[in-house]
Amino acid sequence: MNGVESVIKNGSDDFKFDRRTSLNGKFYFNLKATNGQIIGTSEMYENEAARDKGIESVKQNLTQSTIVDQTT
């Protein structure tokens, strides 16, 4: 639950998305917590625009998310 809550908390802050390029030229991002720890890594994208669209999708979908505890 802490990990999920951290993603929701940090995923709305554009500065927490570390935009990267892999050695093979593909694009991806890491989502980082306030302490700098990576809490999520994206899929590989063919271009920067697709990666940036992925970041926007994460931010948009997090605002519509609800945590449901199914362990009880």
Image (cartoon, rainbow, N blue to C red):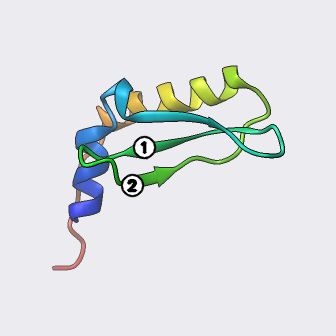
* Residue position for label 2: 39
Left or right of residue 8: residue 30: right
Q: Which residue is rendered at x = 44% and y = 34% of the image?
A: 17
Left or right of residue 49: residue 25: right
Compare marks 2 and 1 and give the one earlier in the sequence: 1
The residue furthest right is 24
Q: Do the residues labelled 2 and 1 touch (CB within 8 Å)?
A: yes
The amino acid beneath tag 1 is: Leu
The amino acid beneath tag 2 is: Ile
* Residue position for label 1: 31
| x, y percent for residue 50 | 68, 26
Left or right of residue 5: residue 45: right
Residue 32, compared with residue 70, is above or below; it is: above
| x, y percent for residue 71 | 22, 79
The residue furthest left is 72
Q: Which residue is rendered at x = 31% and y = 28% of the image?
A: 13
The quarter of the image holding the C terminus is bottom left
